[in-house]
Amino acid sequence: MNQTLQGEGYSYFKYTHNYINEETLANLSYANLNKDDNFGQILANITIPTFKDKLVFYQILQLVIFGLSVVTIYYVVFRLTKQQFLSFIASILILSNFNGNYEMLAEGESWRFMGRVPTLIPIIIAWYLLYRYYKTDKVKSLILSLFLMAIAVFMGHYAALLLPLIIFSAFYFPALIKKDISLIKIIFVIALYLLVTYPIIFRDRDTTKQSFITFFINEPYLAEKVVTQLVAATWPYLIIERLGNFFYLAEPFLPISRLLILPTAVFYLLGGWLVFQKNKKLFPLYCLLFTCTLADIILYLYLDGQRINPLRVFWPGRQFFTTLIYISIITALILQSLLNTKKFFIGILCLIFPIAIFSYNMLIITKYNDLAQYRFDRDKRFIAYMRSISREFTSKTVLITTTPLRFTSYLVARLYAPPGMQFPTTYEQFQSIDPDKEDVIAIDYVHGKNDKGRFTSQGGHILDLTDEYQEGNVDYRDVMGAREK
């Protein structure tokens, strides 16, 4: 709770009179089909006037929403499997996962969090209702499932990434519930889900112009990319990083990822065999989740292959979020199957493993939080300083800041600035305003450093260069172009 929002986490504050342009005008409305994060924007319109600059409340809200999503997954997995240990372990692995959660939860990227996590809840419930429809033949379950699916995708287009879960479940659920269902009925159900989501999805600004079939056939090294991404999602981040550093390899540590392909394949193949032998009734669920894991990776590469290309980039982030939900449940299925062997030593290992994973994730999260704390404290000091001088702001005021404070200025613009106050983010914008010098406020920031030269919170302070700028001793380019220092 000692963190703040960071970077794009302040983006919801952007939609204010001081940043009017075509993009912001399109987002000032509460909701429309062209926006990919309607839920986040609606929630921001409620929370920003309520929480204002009390950033801890935004974090608490994120944790509550994330907690509700994990509870939803626990409930649905339990209803599907009737196995409490399995559901609990899956929830713990999802809750504590570093690779998929850290960027959105601990780095203050609420923009990315609100566009993804909240819509997970109706999607998971819709998934369960599809299961209920197959099991009971009650049409109301299907209708409610379709409604929740449409609402989820409308409120956040990211929810469409879970569409493969629905589509593949239409084929796998009959095997899970041991019920014969005609192929025509399965195809009809899939068509209904596509019908209620396609009119929303095709409007998404991130939708690629290349057809999926063309991508699937022509994408170079697709199989290697999928396998490499699967390895990165399966193994703890630090293991790959430490091995790469040990052998003096540069990111993305491809030799290490290739070395781990065989152990990864053994894990999933042996795990599947174990589930088939010791928990056969849940083997269709295992196959479903592994299929969805591969589909999720392929879909991400299709939609955002340049940014998350695993042959070029190695860093845990939001691209792993849905993939690791599947992998967490798969891992829980394997542990439950091991537990079913009823061997004392194996049972102890099954209990130790999730505790070890949880402890590992908490340690690495704490480590990276500590390393990034200087940035959170920088934003706190900047916001407090802006609040203290906000009475000086007028409609002619122009605020220029160092680059790391650019996003944080969105909060200042939304909460403290009078109409007309300007926040240029480029040299060209500043030059087009051509303000009088006495109307310019210039803010820089200097970080403290430890004995190793690393940035720390201690000694960090706001550097108000307004007087120097007005006296002509500092150029606006010296402030706006400054990086962390």
Image (cartoon, rainbow, N blue to C red):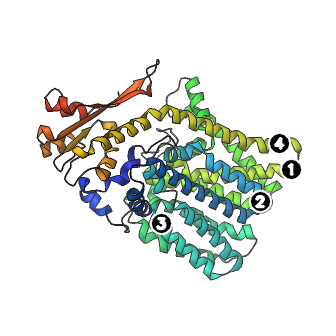
Task: State the separation of the CA atoms marked 3 and 1.
Answer: 41 Å
Report crowding for label 2: few under 14, some 14 to 19, many 20 or more residues within 10 A (C-alpha): few
Task: State the separation of the CA atoms marked 3 and 2.
Answer: 30 Å
In the displayed structure, 268 sits above or below 50; it is: above
* Precedes in sequence: disc 1 or disc 4: 1
Kindly check if marks 1 and 4 are in contact, taking CB atoms under 8 A apart as contact. no
- Which element carries disc 2, helix, strand or loop? loop
Which residue was labeled with disc 4? Answer: 348
* Precedes in sequence: disc 3 or disc 2: 2
Looking at the picture, tell me which residue is in the foreground, 380 or 286: 380
Residue 223 visible (yes or no): no
In the displayed structure, 467 sits above or below 272; it is: above
Task: State the separation of the CA atoms marked 3 and 4.
Answer: 42 Å
In the displayed structure, 76 sits above or below 238; it is: below
Residue 120 visible (yes or no): yes
- Which element carries disc 4, helix, strand or loop? helix
* Precedes in sequence: disc 1 or disc 2: 2
Query: Residue placed at 73% from the left, 76% from the top?
Result: 180
Closer to the camera: disc 1 or disc 4? Answer: 4
Which residue was labeled with disc 1? Answer: 341
Which residue was labeled with disc 3? Answer: 153
Kindly check if marks 1 and 2 are in contact, taking CB atoms under 8 A apart as contact. no
* Precedes in sequence: disc 3 or disc 1: 3
Q: Is residue 462 left or right of residue 335?
A: left
**Residue type indicated by callout 3:** Val
Task: State the separation of the CA atoms marked 1 and 4.
Answer: 12 Å
Task: State the separation of the CA atoms marked 1 and 2.
Answer: 15 Å
Report crowding for label 3: few under 14, some 14 to 19, many 20 or more residues within 10 A (C-alpha): many
**Residue type indicated by callout 4:** Ile
Q: Is residue 136 left or right of residue 23?
A: right
For this orientation, the residue located farthest to the right is 343
Which residue was labeled with disc 2? Answer: 83
